[in-house]
Amino acid sequence: MELEEVLATNKALVKVAKLYRTAQADLLGALDLHPGQDVLLWTLGAKPDGMLITEIAAQLGVEQPTVTRSLSRLDRGGWFVREPVPGDRRATLVKLTDKGRSTIPAIEATWRRLAETATAGMDENQQTALIAALNRVRLNLLALAAETE
């Protein structure tokens, strides 16, 4: 790849990532959420009986302390409740409250707006190609991250 292509690629990826993250933060801010908190709540919304913190971490592909910190940041919002697990003093079950459940459609609407805005003017084939290209970029970067560990 020529330097000009390298620079253009880096610039495009950085600009898109920053713009997407900013738009995401702005839209989620209207729901009193930050990026990442939406996914956590949505994940909980898929399990009406609640989830253990370990299950949330596995589902999100993050470490348990990351989930615990995220839940602590969300704690004051009344989105969920924590319940002890009978027979396991170390385990905590997390369940959405009515407020948390009622926010799920707004989270999904935010995601839809972001996706539709980002792909406006693209036909279905272009959208499919974009998703494939971004997945390839993600896999390439994961491979690079694994090399540096």
Image (tube, grey):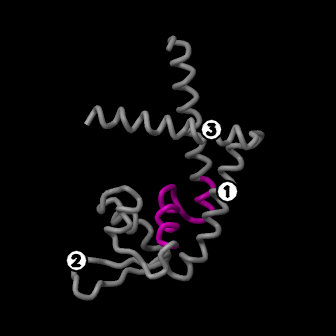
- As helix, strand or loop, the secondary structure at mark 3 comes to helix
Q: On the image, numbered disc 2 is attached to which residue? A: 90
Residue at image position (62%, 38%) is: 130
Closest to the observer: 1 or 102?
1
Q: On the image, numbered disc 1 is attached to which residue? A: 112
Image height of 84 relative to 12, above or below: below
Q: How far, Cα to Cα, is label 3 from label 2?
A: 44 Å
Residue at image position (55%, 38%) is: 134
Q: Earlier in the sequence, mark 1 or mark 2?
A: 2
Quadrant of res 100: bottom right
Which residues lie in the magenta part?
26-45
Quadrant of res 52: bottom left
Q: What residue type is labelled 1?
A: Arg
Residue at image position (41%, 65%) is: 73
Residue at image position (66%, 50%) is: 115
Q: What residue type is labelled 2?
A: Arg
The reply to whether dot 1 and dot 2 touch (C-beta < 8 Å) is no
Point out residue 64 in the picture as x, y percentages from the top left corner. 30, 62
Image height of 67 relative to 103, above or below: above
Q: On the image, numbered disc 3 is attached to which residue? A: 130
Report the quarter where the C terminus lies: top left
Closest to the observer: 148 or 80?
148
Q: How far, Cα to Cα, is label 1 from label 2?
A: 38 Å
Left or right: residue 12 versus residue 1 is right
Image height of 78 relative to 105, above or below: below
Left or right: residue 25 versus residue 124 is left
